[in-house]
Image (cartoon, rainbow, N blue to C red):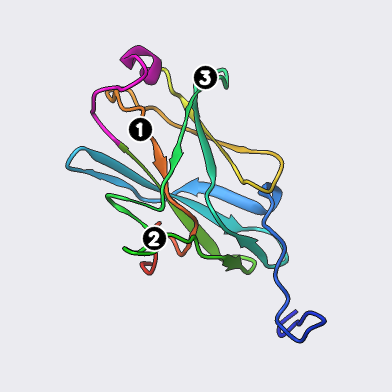
Amino acid sequence: MPGATGTSGTPATPPSCQMNQLSVTEGHGGAASGLEVVPLLFRNTGTTTCRLQGYPELAAADSSGKQIFSARQTPRGPAGGLAAGDSTPPAVDLKPGQTASALWEWEAPATSKNLSCAAIGSVRQVQISLPASPGQTTLSWNISGSCSDDLQVNPFVPGTTGRQGGN
């Protein structure tokens, strides 16, 4: 309800978003200088405002769902994330129909630090979850041709670019 306030007269804090009220899709990504970048889009498909804060949790998995490695959470990567000098993820309040994003990036092709190229080439999906919500969403993904196991994810930011202050 617009203008809702808590008992102290301050605006009420929306509850944390739950996976069952979000649609998670890939935005338009690209590659440059050996870096692959894809914004993950989190659209509120529910009927009430909810809050995203922090980082989505990402795990690369094979076709049977077995996790191979997890994404490292970083405030910013070479292509985006939080603004320079900022290290605190913002609280993103999503009204129904609004979208937040988190940038997902990896070096490709690169030399694997910990895993064989064969293991990395078997990644077929990314499992996405929220820190305060049960359940997950799975997106198809094929990173064949890459030997990078340095998958990174930046925090939630408003808009669709995965970059703080950029829409």
Q: Does the magenta-highlighted stretch encompass residue 32? A: no
Which residue bears the numbered disc 3?
63
Q: Residue at x 52, y 50 (%)?
A: 55
Question: Which residue is drawn at the image coordinates 60% and 65% (left, top)?
Answer: 97
Q: Classify the position of the N terminus by image quarter.
A: bottom right
Q: Residue at x 50, y 47 (%)?
A: 25
Q: Which is closer to the viewer, label 3 or label 1? A: 1
User: What label sits on residue 150 in the rendered view?
Assistant: 1
Q: In the image, residue 141 lies at what x, y percent?
A: 43, 31
Q: Give the x, y percent position of residue 47.
A: 72, 65
In percent of width and height, residue 167 lies at 38, 67
Q: Are marks 2 and 1 in contact (CB under 8 Å)?
A: no
Looking at the rendering, the stretch of residues picked out in magenta corresponds to 107-121
Label ID, residue 82:
2
Q: Disc 2 on helix, strand or loop?
A: loop
**Amino acid identity at mark 3:** Ser
